[in-house]
Image (cartoon, rainbow, N blue to C red):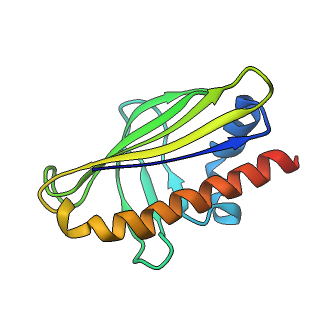
């Protein structure tokens, strides 16, 4: 199962990336991902806290799969053990060549528990993606 959202931001990828990767500032603006801590480098395990609107929050320790400046940040997280409920979360910044950026947030879910969480994923998680995208846009276009 995949969730995917995108938003057009009237700012360069560099500007969007600077706000997006200022993880210490997440509690001040991000309504979905409340914190990301640890050394964000490919191969490292970090700690992330998500609080989807209308659902229980959770803290998990995903492994960083990609971290390319101004382009992509991707991680793989698991619920308890691998194969139960796994999520590969991807944040992508597309340079449109006209001073704007398309910000794409997606997650590919797999595992035997995914069918049990389908409604929550389609509602609370997708809402969280959209709220975060909108706040990122507002910040990038304000500065």
- Which quadrant of the structure image shows residue 47? bottom left
Q: Nearer the viewer, residue 3 or 28?
A: 3
At 11% across and 57% down in the image, what residue appears? 112
Q: Position of residue 111 (x, y in %)?
A: 16, 53
Identity of the residue drawn at 41% across and 30% down: 42
Judge whether 16 appears above or below 125 on screen. above
Apparent side of residue 63 relative to residue 100 in the rendered image (left or right) = left
Q: Residue at the location (70% across, 30% down)?
A: 13
Left or right position of 65 against 95: left
Q: Position of residue 26 (x, y in %)?
A: 64, 58
Determine the image quadrant of residue 122. Answer: bottom left
Q: Nearer the viewer, residue 9 or 43?
A: 9
Instruction: Indicate the position of residue 57 as horizontal and vertical percent values.
Output: 42, 73
Residue at image point 79% right, 23% down: 98
Near-viewer residue (133 or 68) = 133
Q: Which residue of the protein is positioned furthest toward the top in this rendering?
A: 97
* Residue 92 as seen in the image, left or right of residue 107: right
């Amino acid at each position: 199962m995949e969730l995917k959202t995108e938003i057009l931001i009237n700012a360069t990828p560099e500007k969007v990336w600077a706000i997006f990767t200022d993880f210490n500032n997440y509690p001040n603006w991000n309504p979905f991902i409340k914190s990301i801590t640890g050394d964000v480098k490919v191969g490292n395990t970090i700690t992330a806290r998500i609080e989807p609107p209308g659902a229980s929050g959770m803290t998990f320790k995903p492994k960083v799969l990609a971290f390319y400046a101004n382009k992509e940040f991707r991680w793989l997280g698991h619920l308890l053990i691998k194969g139960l409920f796994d999520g590969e979360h991807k944040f992508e910044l597309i340079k449109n060549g006209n001073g704007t950026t398309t910000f794409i947030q997606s997650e590919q879910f797999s595992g035997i528990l995914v069918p049990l969480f389908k409604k929550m994923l389609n509602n609370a998680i997708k809402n969280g993606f959209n709220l975060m995208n909108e706040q990122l846009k507002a910040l990038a276009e304000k500065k």
